[in-house]
Amino acid sequence: MTLAGRALSIGYSDRVVGRGLDVRVQQGEVLALLGPNGGGKTTLLKTLLGILKPLGGEVLIDDRPLAKFSIRERARRIAYVPQTHAPTFAFTVETVVLMGRTAHGGLFSRPSAHDREVARHALEEFGIGHLRDRPYTMISGGERQLVLLARALAQEPQYIVLDEPTASLDFGNQGKVMRQIQNLAVAGHGVLFTTHDPNHALRTADQAYLLRGGERLAHGKVATVLTHANLEALYGASVEMISDTESGANAFLPG
Amino acid sequence: MHRSAAPGLLIALAVLAIGIAIALTVGRYPVAVSDLFDVLWSRLAGRTSTAAPAVENVVLLVRGPRVLAAVLVGAALAVAGSAFQGLFRNPLVSPDILGASSGAALGAVIGIYFSLGVIGIESLAFAGGLAAVAGVYAIGAFLSSRDPMLVLVLTGVVIGALLGAAIGLVKYLADPYNQLPAMTFWLLGSLASTTAADLLPLTLPIGLGTGVLVALRWRMDAMSLPEEEARALGIATGVLRIAIVIAATLVTSASVAAAGIIGWVGLVVPHLARTLVGPDFPRLLPTAALLGGGFLLFIDTLARTMAPIEVPLGILTAVIGTPFFIWLLAGMQRNWS
């Protein structure tokens, strides 16, 4: 059960961002997408989501081309967690999570009791059931990210794609969100996320995909891919690696 | 502590009911409240009223159609405003954002210029509103971009300005003694000439457009998310956007054709409704409709009673709407709820 991009050329009608990209996420596994700004991370992410059409190659869900899925079918397979943003209107947290049920109902149907149950369960899953009736605009950034995760879970997808899920979070919340991402994979979801912090990939992901200038630099198990040499090549900047002599865990420092 | 919509809806309903009662009783021929209820009840029960025939005439034939028209137009503008604000993810949007009002106004002044009858003027206004929005939408689609909503709004602003110039030209060419006052009065909005015959052409498009929005109400909340997010949730945003624009435009054009340009209702009332029941579209829609109807009815009642001559509605809604909106802004600093 995989979400895969095969020989993908990605970009916009007037600009090719990357070519020759092969990427795959398996259910039950976390893939981290790393790379410098402007390297094509977001474009690749949007292509895998079906938001952008590939310029070449194809995206496959369980070996079936993504283009063959209707927009609703697609939403029942892949959920998207965008970077947190403040929406225009002060919807309650429950309403936001219920939006995740859109693809499970008809065009004119109201959320069913089952939909509400799924939404409630998703909120409980992330320990934010108590926020249900609060306006989404009035909760903290960390809570908002968890609400978006709950919405993705309520979508009952096979794959969850997250755009920089830790970007605007404080240190503690970053850890919380990364742990929840791992839990999603343990529960059987295939998870793909972009990040600017190699340590998040080290701590959370099974696989890492390094993307620079629209080309794949490396792809494989985090332990083998996230090396000192690879990261310096990826960002074109010096990186320091620190190892814990007791646990053997590595961490990277910029500069 | 699930937040219920019931209290907010009840308040909106009460505002409308009180508005109707006041509108039917006050005026140059005052009607006692007891007589009003007698007339209305007799009508419903199908028997003859004990009130004086003149009272019955005033309530059912003179004020009745105008009251119904005010409620319909107010509700329509508030419903269209709610839909457009959600669709464009912007609380500052009003129903004429895509040129519906400017198009209708141009149609109307052309109709007046060629001395057409009321039906001709209203038909031209209705067609003008639809044509303006269709044009804006076609140009916006032609200029396909990564941010279709922004392009659509900007196109609406540009075309609106062009239509404004065309309206200015027709006014400039018009007979200053006969046609120009009629145009000015129409452009400022009025329900003074409403008769029972106006209600059908008003009700049909408003009912149709509102029906579409009601049917789509459960998808409207997700439509107010950024485009990519809405699509990732499984919404075919392109088709739905066209449906919402057509529905809201039908509703707006019909109102403008019947009552002229009445600003502020479509902008302010959705905000008021949101403070009562929150932004969830399925509860916002009925609340905004009731409040919009009640609001315009109060304005229209003022318009015909406060001075010896009719005061244009557009002026009253602006005079009342501006301070009200500022007051609303002051209380909403926390968020655009």
Image (cartoon, coloured by chain):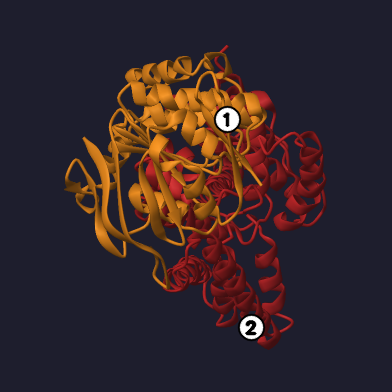
Chain colours: A orange, B red
Q: Amino acid at mark 1?
A: Arg
Give the foreground label among 2 and 1.
1
Are discs 2 and 1 both within one chain?
no
Picture quadrant where residue B163 is located: bottom right
Q: Secondary structure at mark 2?
A: helix
Question: What is the quadrant of the C terminus of chain B in the image?
Answer: top right
| Extreme-bottom residue of the structure | B173
- The chain containing the residue under callout 2 comes to B
Q: Amino acid at mark 2?
A: Val
Residue B46, label in figure: none
* Residue at 71%, 70% in the rendered image: B184
| Extreme-front residue of the structure | A245
Mark 2, residue position: B170
When the figure is inspected, residue B200 is found, relative to residue A202, above or below; the finding is: below
Describe residue B33's horizontal placement relative to residue A98 as left or right: right
Residue A144, label in figure: 1
Q: Secondary structure at mark 1?
A: helix
Picture quadrant where residue B7 is located: top right
Q: Nearer the viewer, residue A155 or B25?
A: A155
Q: Nearer the viewer, residue B39 or A180?
A: A180
When the figure is inspected, residue B59 is found, relative to residue B209, above or below; the finding is: above
Residue B19's spot in the image, x, y percent? Answer: 66, 34
When the figure is inspected, residue B245 is found, relative to residue B278, above or below; the finding is: below
Describe residue B280's horizontal placement relative to residue A57 as left or right: right
When the figure is inspected, residue B315 is found, relative to residue B140, above or below; the finding is: above
